[in-house]
Image (spheres, rainbow, N blue to C red):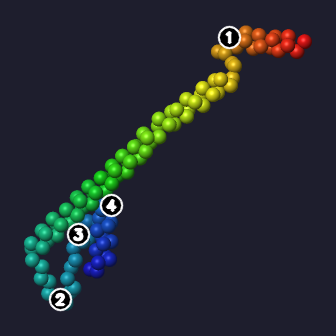
Amino acid sequence: MNPIDAFEKLFFAVFGQTTYDELMILAPVNRVQYRPEWTKSLFKIAFGIYMLVSVVVLVNLLIAMMSDTYQRIQAQSDIEWKFGLSKLIRNMHRTTTAPAPINLITTWLFYLVDVCRAR
């Protein structure tokens, strides 16, 4: 197994696409296989540690990114609230409408004032 194949198998193992059986390498047919039993246990332990560390690092990275996004939104929220409030106040000053039942009276009153001024 060359380093590129090893990297590929470990990379896809993080996403659950590789199993322990796929990582076991068999010796060629014409060669004598010499593999001590403790190497299988060592490989299982090393593979388990790799999987654990990679998942912990990825979860911590996700938490850090979400925390940074939350802090940026929190820093801008006061400015956004003040901007929205100023827009609301500006629109309220621009219009002279009253609530629904009263607007009939005020509309007719302003109309009569405009007619009187025009004469």
Q: Earlier in the sequence, mark 3 or mark 1?
A: 3
The residue shown at (85%, 10%) is 116
Q: Earlier in the sequence, mark 2 or mark 1?
A: 2
> Label 1 near label 2: C-beta < 8 Å?
no
When the figure is inspected, residue 72 is found, relative to residue 19, above or below; the finding is above
Q: Position of residue 26 (x, y in %)?
A: 21, 79
**Residue annotated with mark 2:** 31
Q: Nearer the viewer, mark 4 or mark 1?
A: 1
Q: Amino acid at mark 3?
A: Asp
**Residue annotated with mark 1:** 102
Q: Which quadrant does the N terminus fall into?
A: bottom left
Looking at the rendered structure, the secondary structure element under dot 1 is helix
Looking at the rendered structure, the secondary structure element under dot 4 is loop
Q: CA distance from mark 4 to mark 1?
A: 65 Å
Q: CA distance from mark 3 to mark 4?
A: 16 Å
Q: CA distance from mark 3 to mark 1?
A: 80 Å
Q: Amino acid at mark 2?
A: Arg
Q: Position of residue 72 (x, y in %)?
A: 43, 45
The residue shown at (15%, 65%) is 45
Q: Earlier in the sequence, mark 3 or mark 4?
A: 4
Q: Which mark is residue 15?
A: 4
Q: Position of residue 14 (x, y in %)?
A: 30, 62
Q: Nearer the viewer, mark 3 or mark 1?
A: 1
When the figure is inspected, residue 42 is found, relative to residue 34, above or below; the finding is above
Q: CA distance from mark 2 to mark 1?
A: 99 Å
